[in-house]
Amino acid sequence: MDLAHLVHAVRALSRWAPALLGLLLVAGEVPAHPLAPVGFALTEQADGAVAARWRQPLPVRAGTNLAPVWPERCQTPGAPRTQVSERAVTLTWRVDCGAAGLEGARVGVSGLALGGINALVQVELRDGRRFERLLDGEPAFFRVPAREASGWLAWNYAGWGALHLASGWDHLAFVAGLFALLGFSRRLAWAVTGFTLGHSLTLAVAVGAAGAVSAHWAELGIALSLVVLALELARPAGAPPGPLRRHPIALSLAFGLLHGLGFADALRQVGLPAGRVPLALVSFNVGIELAQLALVAVLAAAAQAWSRAGGRSVRVDALPATAIGSLGVFWVCERVVALL
């Protein structure tokens, strides 16, 4: 974008200056979704005790009171061993859960709904059987089954992928921006699918665990991509198409790659076994792709209804760019501060 087009973009965005302030206030109260979930792991030991590990990412939303939901048959744990880093606080215990062990016990996490975060709960029995559940909202618990149903883990992660998109303002803004840029077209479908493709490329990183990128840096890259997309949307109507309009799949591919790197890093940090990461990412991607296509269908229906109602007579040319750009700038500043 040359200087003249940049000046035009700034003038166009300034028309919606009051909306900018409101959006920044909203962004401060409703953050983009966190990539790292709470991790709660229970492992039966050979001596009959249970080793428990709780990992809570930092920072935590004000007013949040996250806590493990212990099995009823377990004794109240004593003071944990505590380890604090810049990214998380980790607590560990040894708990007596009796001769019956953890099979059939209720395990979970409280406070997720107010915290705006998910939880990955893992249970490993003495005989090697292993169970994982992704929990969200209240009540957030499950009972440890005798046997894992076939395909449950894949279904669980696909559902989380769809929920992840629906609860992530940065991702929703990105898809909405692509729709505003390209309209309801085949190029839009390819661009949206480019996100999933970029996300899938992280499988090699997740499996090899080499070249991992911190979720904090990935989140900063996601915010920057929103700013770039907003500047492209703000180009004057008569200007030649910019590189993002000509090659939208490039931006969506990069966005998906950054998002996937952050998600893979989050799974490693919370303790998901390397052997389960590929299935988790593939299922997660399927859920995201289906949710993205559903969002595009909703946006297309809304745009058609707006057009039929005569909405084109109202000047809203700069609104998508202003909304996406202001949110992107806010999150860039927020994430840069978090890295300092």
Image (cartoon, rainbow, N blue to C red):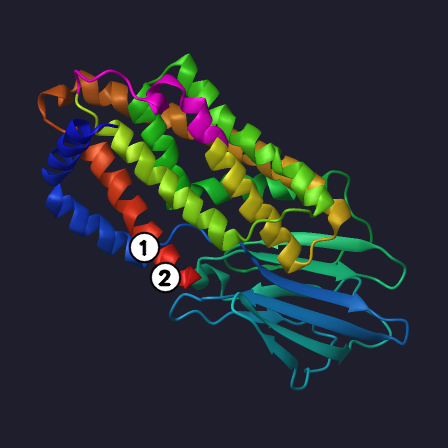
Say whether residue 99 is visible: yes
What residue do we see at 32% from left, 55% from top?
333
Q: Quadrant of residue 235?
A: top left
Residue 294 or residue 143, whichever sits in front: 294
- Name the outermost residue toward the top: 186
Query: Is 96 positioned to the left or the right of 247 in the image?
Result: right
The amino acid marked with disc number 2 is: Val
Residue underneath mark 1: 333
Residue underneath mark 2: 337
SS at circle 2: helix
Residue 336 or residue 97, whichever sits in front: 336
Query: Is 63 positioned to the left or the right of 12 in the image?
Result: right
- Name the outermost residue toward the front: 3
Query: Is 137 positioned to the left or the right of 26 in the image?
Result: right
Location of the N terminus by quadrant is top left
Q: Quadrant of residue 205?
A: top right
Looking at the image, residue 2 lies above or below residue 110 = above
Q: Quadrant of residue 12?
A: top left
Say whether residue 167 is visible: no
Looking at the image, residue 250 lies above or below residue 337 = above
Q: Residues within 10 Å of mark 1 (few under 14, many from 20)?
A: few
Residue 55 or residue 110, whichever sits in front: 55
Q: Are marks 1 and 2 in contact (CB under 8 Å)?
A: yes
Q: Which mark is residue 235?
A: none
Query: Is 187 positioned to the left or the right of 57 in the image?
Result: left
Q: Residues within 10 Å of mark 2 (few under 14, many from 20)?
A: few
Coordinates of residue 243 in the picture (x, y in percent): 35, 22
Looking at the image, residue 8 lies above or below residue 66 = above
Please state the extent of the stretch shown in magenta in the rendering: 237-253
The amino acid marked with disc number 1 is: Cys
Coordinates of residue 234 in the picture (x, y in percent): 21, 29
What residue do we see at 60% from left, 39% from top?
284
